[in-house]
Image (cartoon, grey):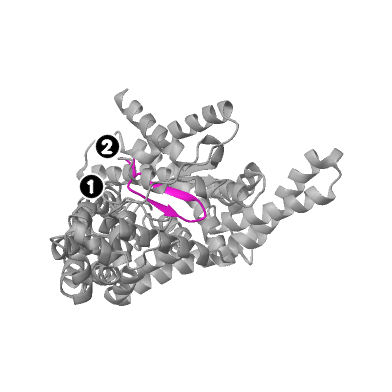
C-alpha cells in the first residue's frame, strides 16, 4: 500500500507541472520514460518538474518524455492516467502555469541542464524529417512489445540454466512454453501495433500478420518453394499490416456505407493476405535471413573493428534518433537466433558514459553542483539509463561526450573481439542495458562465459571512458570555467545576461 501511495504521490506531483489534466492529450510509457502528448508546451514548469525526487530528467522529442527509470515508470503511469481522467472530469481547462522565478545566482549544473534542454529542442527540430518521423513510428510499434520480450527472455535464460544443470526437469518444458509462446506469435502483435500506428483497424492488421505464423502455410508454394510458418517474421508482419491499412483506407473511400461492415474487412484481409502469402513472406524471409547472416559475418570476421564502430557511434545515433532503425533488426535476430548479438555491443556506449561522468566528478573537485548531479545520476547510469548524464553533464560540456564515445568504442571492441573468436554474446530481449542486461544475456558457449565477456566489456568501457575523459576531456579553458565553487561559477558560465526559458534545476532531479 505504501508503494502505491508513493507512486500516486509522484503522479500527483507531476500532473500540475505539465499543465494539468486538460493539457495532456496522450499518455504512454516505454522502459524508462513517461511519454506525454501536450496541447501547450509552454504550460510545463521545467524547473519544478525536474525537482520532483522521482524524476531523473526530461527529454523533449515528438512527445514530452519524463525519465522515471525502469520499474518506476510502469507503476507511476497507471496512477497518472487515473489522475488525468479524474482531472478532465472535474476541470474544463488548464490555467497558465506561473513561470519559475529566475534564480539570483544560477548554479553551474543548472547552466548545463539549460544547454542540454536547448540541444534537445534543436534535435527535436532536426528530427522532424519524413525519415525520422518514420523511424519514430517504427519505435512506437516495437516499444510496447519490450516488456513481454524482457519477461520471456529472462524465463528463457532461467530455463536454459536449469536444463544445463539438469535441475527441475519436470518444470523446464513449462518454462520453455512460457518463453517461446510470445515469440511464436510476435508477428501478430507487430501487425496489430502497425495497423494502429498507421491509422488502420488494429485487429485487421493482426489478422493479416497471423497468416505468417499459421502452420497451414507449409502447404503453399510460392516462388518455386514451399513456405514455412513464420517465414518473413516481424518484417513480413510489418509490411503486411501496412498494406492492410492502405487497402482498408481505400475501401473506406469507395465502398458504400451500407456495405462497409461486410466488404471492407473482407477485402482488407483477402487482398493483403494474398499479397503476403505470394510475395511478402518470401521477400521478407530473404531480407530477414540476410540480416542474420550479415550480423554473424560482420562479428565473425571483423568483430573488434565492428564493435569499435558500433560502440563508439551509438551515442551519436541516439542523439540523432537513428537508433530506432535498429529495433526491427534486434527483433529479427532474436526471432531467428534466440538473441541479438548487437545489443551487448551497443550497451557499451552507456559504460563509456558512466566512465566519463566519474572522470568529470574527479576533474571538477571544486564544483559541488555538477558533482551532486553526477552522484544523483550515476546509479541510473549503471543500470543503463543514460539520459540524465548525457543531457545534464557530458553533452553540454562537449569534450566529455566525445570521450564517453571513446569509452563505448573500446568496450564494444572488447565484446566484438570475443565474438570474432567464436564466443557470441547476445541478449534475449531489447530495452535494458548496463547492469540491467545481465539477466537477459545468452550466447553459444554457456552462461558463465557470456556473463564474463559482457562484464569485461563494461569494465573496459568504464576504464576507457574514465581515462579518455580525465586526460583529454577538459581543456584549460573548460577547467577554468567550471572547476570553481558554485557561487564563483555562475558569472563565468553565463556569458549571455539575457534570461532563458529553458533553464532547469538538475542536481537533485537528474
Q: Is residue 60 magenta?
A: yes
| Closer to us: 192 or 167 | 192
| Closer to us: 328 or 95 | 95
Vertical comparison of 184 with 85: above or below: below
Q: Position of residue 30 (x, y in %)?
A: 43, 46
Callout 2: 10 Å neighbours few (<14), some, many (20+)? few
User: Between disc 2 and disc 1, whose residue precedes?
Assistant: 1
**Callouts 2 and 1 close, C-beta under 8 Å:** no
**Quadrant in the picture for the N terminus:** top left
Residue 19: give its label: none
The residue drawn where x is 24% and y is 35% is 168
Number of numbered labels in the structure image: 2
Callout 1: 10 Å neighbours few (<14), some, many (20+)? few
The residue singled out by tag 2 in the image is 169
Q: Quadrant of residue 368?
A: bottom left
Vertical comparison of 422 with 375: above or below: below
Q: Quadrant of residue 493?
A: bottom left
Q: Position of residue 313 (x, y in %)?
A: 35, 71
Vertical comparison of 3 with 470: above or below: above
Q: Position of residue 395 (x, y in %)?
A: 32, 65
Secondary structure of the residue carrying tag 2 is loop
Decide if residue 345 is on the left or right side of residue 124.
Answer: left
Q: Which residues are magenta?
A: 54-71
Q: Is residue 448 magenta?
A: no
Spatial CA distance of label 2 from label 1 is 10 Å
Q: Quadrant of residue 415?
A: bottom left
For residue 424, say whether it is visible. Answer: no
Secondary structure of the residue carrying tag 1 is helix
Q: Position of residue 299 (x, y in %)?
A: 32, 71
The residue singled out by tag 1 in the image is 164
The residue drawn where x is 71% and y is 55% is 246
For this orientation, the residue located farthest to the top is 1
Amino acid at each position: 500500500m505504501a508503494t502505491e501511495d508513493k507512486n500516486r504521490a509522484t503522479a500527483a506531483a507531476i500532473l500540475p507541472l505539465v499543465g494539468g489534466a486538460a493539457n495532456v492529450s496522450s499518455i504512454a510509457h516505454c522502459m524508462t520514460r513517461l511519454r506525454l502528448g501536450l496541447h501547450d508546451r509552454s504550460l510545463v514548469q521545467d524547473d519544478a518538474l525536474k525537482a520532483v525526487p522521482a524524476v531523473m530528467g526530461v527529454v523533449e522529442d515528438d512527445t514530452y518524455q519524463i525519465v522515471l527509470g525502469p520499474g518506476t515508470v510502469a507503476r507511476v503511469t497507471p496512477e497518472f492516467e487515473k489522475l488525468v481522467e479524474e482531472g478532465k472530469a472535474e476541470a474544463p481547462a488548464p490555467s497558465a502555469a506561473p513561470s519559475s522565478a529566475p534564480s539570483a545566482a544560477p548554479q553551474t549544473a543548472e547552466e548545463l541542464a539549460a544547454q542540454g534542454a536547448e540541444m534537445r529542442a534543436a534535435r527535436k527540430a532536426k528530427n522532424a524529417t519524413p525519415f525520422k518521423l518514420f523511424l519514430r513510428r517504427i519505435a512506437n510499434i516495437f516499444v510496447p512489445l519490450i516488456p513481454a520480450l524482457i519477461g520471456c527472455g529472462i524465463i528463457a535464460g532461467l530455463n536454459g540454466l536449469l536444463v544445463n544443470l539438469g535441475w527441475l526437469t519436470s518444470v523446464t518444458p513449462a518454462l520453455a512454453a512460457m518463453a517461446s509462446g510470445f515469440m511464436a506469435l510476435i508477428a501478430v502483435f507487430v501487425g496489430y501495433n502497425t495497423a494502429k500506428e498507421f491509422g488502420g483497424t488494429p485487429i485487421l492488421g493482426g489478422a493479416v500478420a497471423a497468416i505468417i505464423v499459421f502452420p497451414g502455410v507449409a502447404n503453399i508454394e510460392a516462388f518455386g518453394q514451399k513456405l514455412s510458418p513464420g517465414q518473413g517474421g516481424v518484417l513480413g508482419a510489418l509490411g503486411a499490416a501496412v498494406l492492410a491499412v492502405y487497402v482498408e483506407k481505400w475501401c473506406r473511400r469507395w465502398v458504400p456505407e451500407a456495405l462497409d461492415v461486410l466488404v471492407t474487412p473482407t477485402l482488407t484481409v483477402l487482398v493483403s493476405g494474398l499479397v503476403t502469402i505470394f510475395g511478402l513472406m518470401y521477400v521478407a524471409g530473404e531480407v530477414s535471413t540476410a540480416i542474420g547472416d550479415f550480423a554473424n559475418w560482420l562479428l565473425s570476421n571483423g568483430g573488434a573493428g565492428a564493435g569499435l564502430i558500433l560502440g563508439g557511434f551509438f551515442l551519436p545515433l541516439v542523439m540523432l534518433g537513428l537508433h530506432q532503425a535498429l529495433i526491427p533488426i534486434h527483433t529479427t535476430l532474436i526471432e531467428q537466433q534466440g538473441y541479438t548479438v548487437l545489443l551487448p555491443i551497443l550497451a557499451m556506449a552507456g559504460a563509456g558514459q558512466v566512465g566519463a561522468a566519474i572522470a568529470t566528478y574527479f576533474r571538477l573537485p571544486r564544483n559541488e553542483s555538477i558533482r551532486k548531479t553526477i552522484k544523483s545520476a550515476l546509479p541510473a547510469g549503471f543500470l543503463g539509463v543514460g539520459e540524465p548524464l548525457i543531457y545534464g553533464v557530458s553533452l553540454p560540456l562537449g569534450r566529455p561526450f566525445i570521450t564517453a564515445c571513446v569509452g563505448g568504442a573500446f568496450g564494444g571492441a572488447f565484446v566484438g573481439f570475443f565474438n570474432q573468436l567464436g564466443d557470441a554474446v547476445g541478449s534475449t530481449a531489447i530495452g535494458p542495458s548496463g547492469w540491467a542486461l545481465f539477466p537477459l544475456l545468452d550466447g553459444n558457449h554457456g552462461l558463465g562465459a557470456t556473463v564474463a565477456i559482457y562484464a569485461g566489456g563494461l569494465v573496459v568501457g568504464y576504464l576507457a571512458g574514465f581515462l579518455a575523459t580525465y586526460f583529454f576531456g577538459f581543456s584549460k579553458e573548460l577547467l577554468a570555467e567550471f572547476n570553481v565553487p558554485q557561487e564563483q561559477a555562475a558569472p563565468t558560465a553565463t556569458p549571455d545576461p539575457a534570461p532563458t526559458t529553458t533553464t532547469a534545476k538538475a542536481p537533485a532531479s537528474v
